[in-house]
Image (cartoon, rainbow, N blue to C red):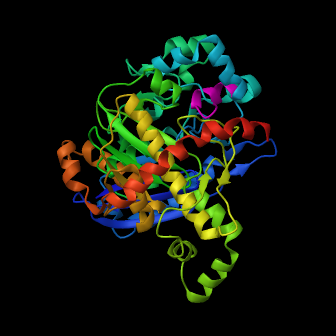
Amino acid sequence: MLLGIDVGTTGAKAMVFTPEGEVKGYAFEEYGIIYTPEGYAEQDAEAVWQAAKRVIKKAVSGCGGEVKSISLSVQGDAVIAIDRSRKAISRAHLGMDYRAKTEVKECEEQFGAKEIFRHTGMRPHPMNTFVKILWIKKHDRRLYDRAHKFVTYADFIMGKLGSDSIVIDYTMASRTQAFDLKNRTWSKEILEKYGVDEAKLAIPAASGVIVGKIERKLAEELGISKEAVLVTGGHDQTCAAVGAGITREGMALDSHGTAEVISTVFEAPKLGDVMFESFYPCYIHALPEMYVTFSLNHTGGALLKWFAEEYCLTDRQEAEREGKGLYETIIARMPQDLSPVMFLPYLNGSGTPTCDLRMKGAVLGLTMSTNRYDIARAVLESLCYEMRINLNQMQKADIHVENIRCVGGGARSPLGLQMKADILGIPVTTLKVREAACFGAAIVAGRAAGIYRGTKDIERLVQTDVVYEPRMDMQKKYEERYPVYQGLYAAMRDTMYRL
């Protein structure tokens, strides 16, 4: 059996799979984010570890003795200070914690934003792990000096499981902004420039490398074989891509959760001006010798949730009376044709390719006949339009996407999936195993165990479900509407700034 663990921003999952991809155990537990009065976003890393242990124990109950290989999928960009006993001595500073804006400016001024990007594949940004370490070094020197290591959730959880040393996989290391993408080592040039001791960072290793066996007492506590090996995993987007069978160029994964992320892979680093200007990262994939980038919309699934909770009270009450889901009720009442209005989904700033934190959301084209279902459809359409803008932008960087596979909450809506196909003009496919991050981590564990030899084995293992093809009539209508949406950001930007 193979165990895949996904440590996300708001919850941990664990799944047990047979080598044939059959699910034998599953568990999930939510946990919180600590928003401080200063506006920081933090997490109790030790509490997350306890939650991870609970879901592992529950998932493996009944088959734990048969688990032979374990790997991880983790949220990106969090940083945790640990002591020599591998205990967290600080809260995790999460990826969404943007306190280090001054340190970003210092990186841009002292080293050059483009130079850093071309060296590391990461443009300076407050979410980056290295920038967070610089903030700690400047504003909490006592913590910096006390820390034995600064780790992400990848090296933190793997260390807790019992890895021989503190090891960070290449996918996570190459997201820090301090990793030499070409040589696959920590960048001595960057570390020396900013006075960060390399000894305070984990040892980089490729995904799919065995780094020890599960700690014996922990194996007994969780009900796992003491011979189970620990295998370096990856960033959740890369693991999800593996679990969705995104193994070659031309394929992309739409991960539609709280945010919406479109991930795609390629064989050689792409570090040109289009990638830089569009805020697309270039980092190492969980599959050997491949690289990955993604587009990001901050308000994917969170957008419809916000709209439904704020403006659809009567629908909620009716759904509860009839025993239906709220989203199901709203979607059933949306117009079948294009929405007569347009929605700008920038409630938390715009995502890629503009990444404009000053932008705000808007509804355009309101009339006295507009109802909330028109707006609800416009909300879904806006997310698809944003996807199209990003796919068009990626083409300028010689990244061509021919089909998309969907996972996450958005993969449960036939209307939303068909809308994606119509607006993007390419097939959109769902998967039999929709928890792609856990599945991907298990596949990485299986590669280390010699169960899967290459990409052909992965392609055979990952099974697709429903394919949504573009409908010619709707595609033509969206072709006419898309240029209108495409121009809204530029048309509204100055007004939003003034507002």
Question: Magenta region's main secondary structure?
Answer: helix
Residue drawn at (59%, 12%) of the image:
111
Rendering quarter of residue 341 = bottom right
Q: Position of residue 26 (x, y in %)?
A: 41, 66
Instruction: Assign the N terminus to one quadrant of the image.
Output: bottom left
Q: Is residue 417 magenta?
A: no
The residue positioned 44% from the left and 34% from the top of the image is 393
Marks counted in the figure total 0
The location of residue 447, given as percent across then percent down, is 25, 44
Question: Does 136 sit above or below residue 73?
Answer: above
Q: Is residue 158 left or right of residue 433?
A: right
The magenta segment? 126-136
Identify whether 373 is placed above or below 19: below
- Residue 446 visible: yes
> Which of the 4 image quadrants contains residue 224?
bottom left
Residue 449 in the image, given as x and y percentages of width and height: 24, 46
Residue 433, percent from left and from top: 33, 62
Q: Give 284 or 31, whichever is nearer the viewer.
A: 284
Quarter holding the C terminus is top right
Which of 171/330 is in front?
A: 330
**Residue 132 among those drawn in magenta:** yes
Q: Residue at x 54, y 75 (%)?
A: 333
User: Which residue is at 67% across, 68% downward?
Assistant: 309
Q: Residue furthest bottom?
A: 321
